[in-house]
Amino acid sequence: MNAITLHRRALLRAGGAVVVAFGLGLRPRGAAAWTEKPVATDQVAAFLAIGADGEVTVYVGKVDLGTGVRTGFMQIVAEELDVPLARIRVIEGDTALTPDQGPTYGSLSIQNGGVQLRAAAATARRALLRLAAERLGADAAALRVEEGVVIAPDGRRASYADLVGGRALDLAVDANAPIKPPEARRVVGRAVPRVDIPDKVFGRFAYVHDLRLPGMLHGRPVRPPALGATAEAVEPDSVRHIPGVRQVVHRGGFVGVVAETEWAAIRAARELRVRWSDWAGLPDQAKLWEHVRATPVAQVQVTSERGDAAAAIGGAPRRLAASYDFPIHTHGSMGPSCAVAAFEGGRLTVWSASQATHNLRKQLALMLGMPAEAIRCIYMEGAGCYGRNGHEDAAADAALLAREAGRPVRVQWMRADEHGWDPKGPPHLVDLRAGLDARGDILGWESEAFIPKGAGGNVDLVAAELAGLPREGQIHPGNIIHNLALPYAVPAVKTTCHRLESTPFRPSWIRTPGRMQNTYANEAFLDECAAEAGADPVEYRLRLLPRDDPRRREVLERAARLAGWETRPSPRPDREGEVLRGRGVSYCKYELVRTYVAGVAEVEVNRRTGAFRVTRFFCAHDCGQIVNPDGVKAQVEGNIIHTLSRTLHEELSFDRRAVTSLDWASYRSISFAEVPEIVIELIDRPTERPWGAGEPAAAIVPSAVSNAIFDATGVRLRSVPFTAARLRAALQGA
Amino acid sequence: MSQTLALTVNGQAVRLTVDDPDMPLLYALRNDLGLIGPHYGCGLAQCGACTVHLDGAAARSCVLPVREAAGRHVTTLEGLGTPERPHPVQAAFIAEQAVQCGYCTNGMIMQAAALLARTPQPTEAQVKEELAGNICRCGTQPRVVAAVLRAARGG
């Protein structure tokens, strides 16, 4: 690594810039205070501690990405232990303190993380009651707990603090420890207000962006103008005139600046003269789908097969075929990725809003050639990420710069860094064919998705890639094969994923990865089949739903009822006048094994201009047991609005060298006026297990909109985003 | 050359010494004064996360040179209200749970508070119009609108 130090004095500038802000409790646990505790997921002490004052500390590997799940975890522990919410604090995603429960993705925080936490709390409660029974000379079954105090029938009391306060809960988790039955629950199942909202509303919430360490410098990466370019020459003299600039760091394609102040770092990153090599390895965006079809296939995965679908379609009296495509997307976090890195005594501490601090630690160890044990990654909330955005990459930038600078370094990306360099949701293309009998019933269904290889895993760090440092070198777009298989009973079906060797941009997962794109293709094409059959789209689906699972039918029927669904085929017959109205339905059983969701979109279309609005969106949602109904409702709202933004507007633009949609004008997000009225019906099932809610409702959005536009106009949109220009062109061609 | 500027921030007289008077106000607020309510979102006045009040009107601090704040009154989210004395919009955001990740919340509240100062009883359409330049990626928009209308009703 080539690091040029510009100013040798390591002093904070007097009288001006830097550091006033420590009155707000922003200073974190420092790298020096490297505490350890049990973190194995089979140990109660990995999840819970009861202090001498009776305060309960919850340690979770799943983190609150702005979803409110922290409050949900607190509810679960408050319920099982009978302690007040106000006496619980939560530590998330700290590799030195919390169990590794896997990355916070896939709508698994409550479903897996919360259920593990619940088992730990239930195990602890049972042990605490046994201890109290001995202490009080009473039968454990006769004891009750109020606000962390065990009370015997004769009124004698022993608090949790009296029983174990300050000592580790040395117990193995019993996954079968009895949990509170539904009728006894007082906290779980209630709309408890989120604990983080007051601080966020009063400007007192410290995001990772707000962390300031003593002696900390500010860094900025200087990214190449082409993804694969390297820096052939860097001219540190070009930024020597900027007061406070300390270092220019350069290795291969990795270039960064470090300065005493944030503004100096920003100016230096803008003004630094670098001679970059040329590179133009991206495909022509206008021919993206040809490029996808021509990409070598690494693996063919048949995700469902029953009967001989090809023969059934070939012999069918009516045949349909269509292709659906979904473009490359960026996460578009409101706050560009940020991290702080500090080396001390041969150890590295990184504060990051990563979804997966335990994995980030391994990635940093690989890149830096350090043992993972010498690295501690601590989660601090960032802006909502909706998947693996650039947080890990900012952490890698900060670590490389801090190592060269010899002082803690904070890196926050600029907007263009975030839009240009976060990993992308890959292009997703699905071909579908169906054969129908004379009545319109489906005889055979075939689909083929063209999507990159790989699943969940670690997304390589930009800094490692640019600097030529060690990295895993695999692509991980998320589990994008899910939900290509149908949630319906079709006599002959074959669904195939052509897993491509490569994809134009470093891929990662964005909210509902693959499940949403596959459901979009399936549910829109199924609507085409229903229209061909002359059948009502809801009735057509109900006919196809397996009868052995009443929850499937219920969610669809309740969505239709909620929307006041008028039973008739699409498109609507009376398509007169300038403004056309329509409605479309969609249904999904998430990954075919969990959360059920169904929805109805209503649209208004100006048939002359193609401009349209989604006016209302109805959604019925069954994620099993609900821990916090308002939290689930907020997630469903977020899924619908975020995915509507992706459906109506979002599409990455690029030339042969790099991303060109580098701001919110060129990569549009939904505006207030475009947000529909949203009506949600949550189906709570307190006796069932809890499933995820952070993603499933997103799955139904693009198809519901495509179906509604078809209902209104008789025109089918099969390419996201559904822009007015595309609809106008389709209307003119119809 | 460094330069000293005098302004009023959240009711307090402040003297800032800056290397570059063209530095956006946002960095002075966050780094020199330790005010973490306003956030960096885009640096382009496109998203609203950095919004403050400048002499009572909503302004994007990410593009406002700090020299232009000299001699003027700046209010940040911290200065708008406190848990003990919340601004009606802050209280309404809590009542409506109108926050997810909260990174955009500063801008939503500051922009809405500026609207209510001008137009105490806005229509729903006026609220949406006022917030047309504020982006939220989490999808809190319906709750934000409900919160602003609740604040206008007096809670």
Image (tube, rainbow, N blue to C red):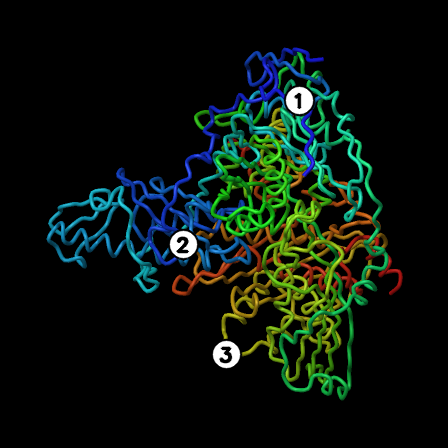
Residue at the (59%, 26%) spot, across then down: B30
Secondary element under disc 3, as helix, strand or loop, is: loop
Q: Residue A564 in the image: x percent, y percent?
A: 61, 62
Q: Mark 1 points at which residue?
A: A7
Q: Name the residue under label 2.
A: A189
Q: Residue A220 in the image: x percent, y percent?
A: 67, 34
Secondary element under disc 2, as helix, strand or loop, is: loop
Chain where mark 1 sits: A
The disc labelled 1 sits on which kind of residue?
His
The quarter of the displayed image where residue A720 is located: bottom right
Please identify the quadrant where the C terminus of chain A is shown: bottom right
Mark on residue A345? none
Residue at the (64%, 34%) spot, across then down: B49
The disc labelled 3 sits on which kind of residue?
Asp
Instruction: Work out whether mark 3 precedes mark 2 in sequence or the reverse, and give the earlier one.
Output: 2
Q: Can residue B59 be seen in this view?
A: no
Report the Cα–Cα distance between label 2 and label 1. Answer: 58 Å
The quarter of the displayed image where residue B147 is located: top right
* Count of marks placed on residues: 3
Circle 3 packing at 10 Å, graded few (<14), some (14-19), many (20+), is: few
Are tags 2 and 1 found on a single chain? yes
Image height of B119 relative to A370, above or below: above
Front: mark 2 or 1:
1
Instruction: Work out whether mark 1 precedes mark 3 in sequence or the reverse, and give the earlier one.
Output: 1
The quarter of the displayed image where residue A113 is located: bottom left
Secondary element under disc 1, as helix, strand or loop, is: loop
Report the Cα–Cα distance between label 3 and label 2. Answer: 28 Å
Mark on residue A548? 3
